[in-house]
Image (cartoon, rainbow, N blue to C red):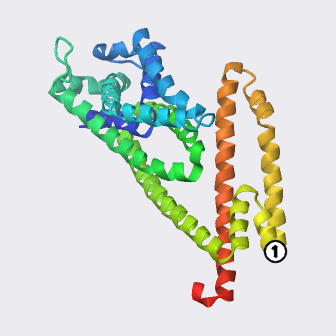
């Protein structure tokens, strides 16, 4: 049971990451001799397999990072490629689950005898009944996690707009590296820890889904409040909109000089850091110049996401202040 649940858990982690990068990581680790796959799964370290999976990874990741250049076309391409790739998640997770069998048993030789009694693979290399159960369990778990991530994306898109695609791609690629590395490290210690890691990932995914839904509802409610405020007091409504784009200006228009000056200083600091990104990234990646364009994209996406988050927070606070002031002026609006 330990081996079955841990291998299913390893495959299920694919649902919280980029499936293609997860496959590439396992294949490259096997090719480098870091992990050991069963003979039936060693095709994953072959050049043709890595080339095909790597191509699919590029085809899904590239439109996400380029969507800020052409929001209409490339954002549509990114949505379509990710939707189509969703149907391959169970297959990718199944491959990871079956591949982890050899990795875990090589790390824990005492499980090798138990592996032989399971008959996961037949004598001619075909997948047996237990193998199909492991592959199906990993695929179903990964599909469920992918579904929850898919449901949370509209909230990210509504909040970050065109920046949502590169932000999501960066998060998924980072998760692939972190989760595959963590899975290997935990498997070396105790395979049961893989089950615990999957449980933690599921809990975090559910929490993120709930937060995304709440954020989406708050955003819709905030837009409605701004529209009402614009109708009741155009100057106050304009201040809220301006505050999102130019931190501090909205507060100054409202007459809150201290907070306005503070937010203006924060905006100046943000612009200074943003304009220095190229030099900072180049200095950080001087040992790997080919990674500088990727680093620039990731850093710019992070900075622009920060801009949106801070702008929304400050505009929301100003909106509440405006509502309170308007309610005191006209109690019928409270």
- Quadrant in which the C terminus appears: bottom right
Give the residue displayed 71% in from the left and 20% down from the top.
Answer: 289
Q: Is residue 75 above or below residue 55?
A: below
Query: Which corner quadrant of the image does residue 228 belong to?
Result: bottom right
Give the residue displayed 72% in from the left and 26% down from the top.
Answer: 285
Of the pair 206 and 64, the residue shown nearer to us:
64
Q: Position of residue 224 (x, y in %)?
A: 55, 68
Query: Which corner quadrant of the image does residue 114 belong to?
Result: top left
Q: Is residue 124 above or below residue 97?
A: above
Q: Position of residue 297 (x, y in %)?
A: 66, 33
Query: Farthest residue toward the bottom?
Result: 331
Asked whether, in this view, residue 324 is left or right of residue 172, the answer is right
Q: Which residue is mark 1?
A: 255
Whether residue 29 is visible to the viewer of this picture, yes or no, is no
Asked whether, in this view, residue 188 is left or right of residue 229, the answer is left
Give the residue displayed 16% in from the left and 25% down from the top.
Answer: 117
- Quadrant in which the N terminus appears: top left
Q: Position of residue 265 (x, y in %)?
A: 83, 57
Q: Is residue 265 above or below residue 250?
A: above
Of the pair 213 and 228, the residue shown nearer to us:
228
Of the pair 119 and 323, the residue shown nearer to us:
323
Packing grade of label 1 (10 A; few <14, some 14-19, many >=20) is few
Dot 1 lies on which element?
Answer: loop
Query: Which corner quadrant of the image does residue 314 belong to?
Result: bottom right
Give the residue displayed 64% in from the left and 66% down from the top.
Answer: 316
Whether residue 52 is visible to the viewer of this picture, yes or no, is yes
Q: Position of residue 119 (x, y in %)?
A: 17, 23
């Amino acid at each position: 049971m330990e081996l079955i649940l841990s291998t299913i858990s390893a495959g299920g982690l694919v649902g919280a990451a980029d499936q293609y990068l997860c496959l590439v990581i396992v294949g490259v680790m096997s090719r480098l001799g870091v992990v050991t796959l069963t003979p039936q799964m060693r095709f994953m370290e072959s050049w043709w397999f890595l080339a095909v999976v790597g191509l699919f990874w590029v085809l899904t990741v590239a439109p996400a990072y380029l969507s800020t250049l052409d929001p209409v076309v490339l954002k549509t391409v990114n949505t379509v490629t990710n939707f189509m790739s969703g149907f391959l998640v169970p297959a990718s997770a199944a491959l990871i689950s079956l591949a982890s069998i050899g990795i875990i048993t090589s790390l824990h030789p005492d499980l090798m005898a138990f592996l032989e009694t399971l008959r996961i693979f037949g004598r001619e290399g075909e997948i047996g009944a237990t193998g199909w159960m492991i592959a199906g369990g990993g695929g179903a778990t990964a599909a469920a996690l992918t579904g929850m991530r898919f449901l949370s994306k509209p909230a990210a898109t509504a909040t970050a707009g065109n920046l949502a695609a590169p932000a999501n791609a960066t998060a998924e690629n980072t998760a692939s590296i972190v989760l595959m590395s963590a899975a290997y490290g935990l498997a070396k210690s105790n395979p049961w820890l893989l089950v615990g890691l999957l449980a933690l990932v599921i809990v975090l995914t559910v929490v993120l889904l709930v937060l995304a839904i709440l954020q989406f509802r708050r955003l819709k409610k905030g837009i409605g409040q701004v529209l009402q405020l614009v109708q009741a007091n155009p100057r106050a409504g304009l201040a809220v909109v301006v505050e999102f784009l130019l931190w501090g200006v909205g507060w100054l228009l409202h007459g809150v000089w201290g907070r306005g000056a503070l937010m203006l200083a924060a905006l100046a600091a943000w612009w200074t850091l943003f304009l220095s990104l190229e030099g900072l990234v180049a200095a950080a990646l001087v040992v790997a110049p080919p990674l500088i364009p990727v680093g620039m994209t990731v850093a710019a996406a992070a900075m622009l996401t920060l801009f949106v988050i801070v702008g929304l927070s400050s505009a929301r606070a100003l909106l509440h202040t405006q509502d309170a002031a308007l309610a005191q002026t006209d109690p019928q609006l409270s």
